Amino acid sequence: MTHTNFTIFHPAVFVLLGIPGLEAYHVWLSIPFCLMYITAVLGNSILIMVIITEHNLHEPMYFFLSMLAITDILLSTTTVPKALAIFWLHAHDIAFDACVTQMFFIHAFSAMESGVLVAMALDRFVAICNPLRYATILTPVVVVQIGGLVVLRGRIGVAVLVRGILLLLPFPILLRRLVFCQATVIGHAYCEHMAVVKLACSESTVNRAYGLAVALLVVGLDVLAIGVSYALILQAVLKVPGGEARLKAFSTCGSHICVILVFYVPGMFSFLTHRFGQQVPHHVHVLLATLYLLVPPALNPLVYGVKTQQIRQRVLRMTTLRNSSWRLIQPSFFLIGIPGLEESQHWIALPLCVLYLLALLGNVTILLTIWTDPSLHQPMYLFLAMLSGIDLVLASSTAPKTLAVLLVHAHEIGHTVCLIQMFFIHAFSSMESGVLVAMALDRYVAICHPLHHSTILHPGVIGRIGVAVLVRGILLLLPFPILLRRLVFCQATVIGHAYCEHMAVVKLACSESTVNRAYGLAVALLVVGLDVLAIGVSYALILQAVLKVPGGEARHKAFSTCGSHICVILVFYVPGIFSFLTHRFGQQVPHHVHVLLAILYLLVPPALNPLVYGVKTQQIRQRVLRVFDIKGQI
């Protein structure tokens, strides 16, 4: 084949299958994958924060551990979001350049993690075999203090980083010289080097040889170095007199050995299967290869958190707040429930409990219906699935504690728990508002640009919108608990509410709270103001387009597609705006009315949304009736 420009033979996109042979179980597999990813990000972030904030942990062992935690976060983040997009949104396409970039980062960060494990083995060797020279051999890494952030610039860390980049940089360069014909389907959940190389229809011997050389150079030399280190450690420990001293020496290596086994064993299995494991079922190989990049990042912080006493104690101090002065400034709160209606609280709890059960049952039904019916994998229903997921969290963040207050008089709530509840309430309210904007955008495109609907709102765009809604909710509301922690609370810790609401908590502070009030007002105006404006503009354009449509029936059909969404918008925004205005300007409104409406505001929309969409949306109604085997005319 003669050609002058290889780039014309690069496919526009590759198609990632996910886990071939287990397509029917993708939704269920996504649940443990998502939980492991959250555990990995949260656990490693806690490790990094603990090591940064605890000066007693500024030692080589913990610096290496923080490097491992950073690498774990980056390694899991390179694969899991795309894998979840495949499982949830069927977003199988990945651009050629994006595929090559993902492949580079996966292998580069894997090489860096292997290098960090070697450095940790070296640290254990020096600590056990040359304890008197430990401080002189492993001199403290250069630490620069910039605004409270510790930046590590150790030579070992730089060497690990440079090795990972330089050794893996030829991968994408060599891949770009290959010719790809029509076989652009990758039987994997992410872009792996050998999986991509096997698709090439030109000579790929150089790619295969270099991939094998890098694997042997990185894994082979690193495993050899770790093996030699632990052989010398074992030799030194066996010379130590006394069983207790030996046990203590071995225990310092226990966490590291567990991490090494979890990292290398699945990695070697995946490497060997690609080259010699033709008898291994493909779905087993892909499943283990995906878990290989998820299990170590999720387990590493748990292993070190349990096995390392200093980290365990620091985390416990952060979570239990045992310091007496901290307790003085950060007291527990007392939730009254519904002030003025204490005698009727048991009866009020009954309809609230019914609403909560309706919210759980209805939204779970909506989620299962959309996930199990491929015909509903369209933008409108994917946004509805997002709305149902948010409603589940939003209702669950308030209803259990509210019912506990009303039914069993469990009025006390810890300071940290109160702030967490407050964050979840406001963050997920912001996310729900963002999803309603996205649904308005979907209706606008469907009515005003129906021929371009599938190209404008394709699965990739929907996934990015979902991520943007999630990130906006977290970033905008994360300062709420942070700013509240700086306030001083005296003796007035009674909240005249059934849950922890931002302004209700701020009003209890006996220190300056202007910043909290101003930021709360800014967020409310930014979220609700911009979102309501965006929805209003969308429906103004929709109304303008519909009025130009000839024929009353066509107009009625166009309006009916927006009916459910308009009902949901009114149910969500009207009580929310009322609650917001009452907190600031509604001194004449009876307090029990305000509290009761604020409770219903977080329960009525989650309970009504699935009913509204279930009744108004024919596809969902038909699917639910088929699931329950209800026969008759729909």
Image: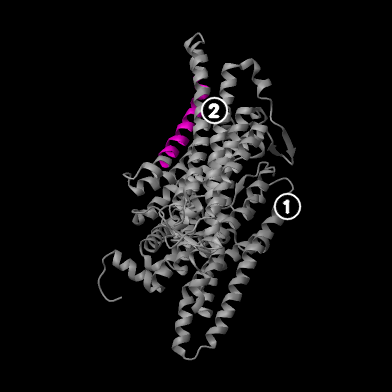
**Residue 29 point in image, percent of width and height:** 39, 50
Residue position marked by numbered label 2 in the rendering: 308
**Residue for point 69% across, 36% down:** 153
Comparing 4 with 561, the one in front is: 4
Identified by mark 2, the residue type is Thr
134 lies left or right of 361? right
Foreground label between 2 and 1: 2
Looking at the image, can residue 475 be seen? yes
* Mark 2 in CB contact with mark 1 (< 8 angstroms): no
Q: Quadrant of residue 374?
A: bottom left
| Mark drawn on residue 87 | none
Give the CA separation, mark 2 to mark 1: 39 Å
Circle nearer the N terminus (2, 1): 2
Percent across and percent down for residue 600 are: 50, 61
Task: Look at the image and say whether residue 364 sits in the magenta stretch.
Answer: no
Q: Nearer the viewer, residue 21 or 475?
A: 21
Q: Residue type at mark 1: give it.
A: Val
Q: Is-magenta flag for residue 262?
A: yes
Q: What stretch is highlighted in magenta?
A: 250-270
Is residue 623 found left or right of 407 in the rendered image? left
Residue 335 spot, x, y in % from top left: 55, 48
Whether residue 300 sits left or right of residue 154 in the image: it is left
Residue 515: give its label.
Answer: 1
Residue at 72%, 39% in the rendered image: 148
Along the line of sight, the residue nearer the viewer: 426 or 555:
555
Pick out the residue farthest to the top: 241
The answer to whether residue 116 is above or below residue 500 is above
Relative vertical location of residue 298 with respect to residue 555 in this rendering, above or below: above
> In what element is the residue under mark 1?
helix
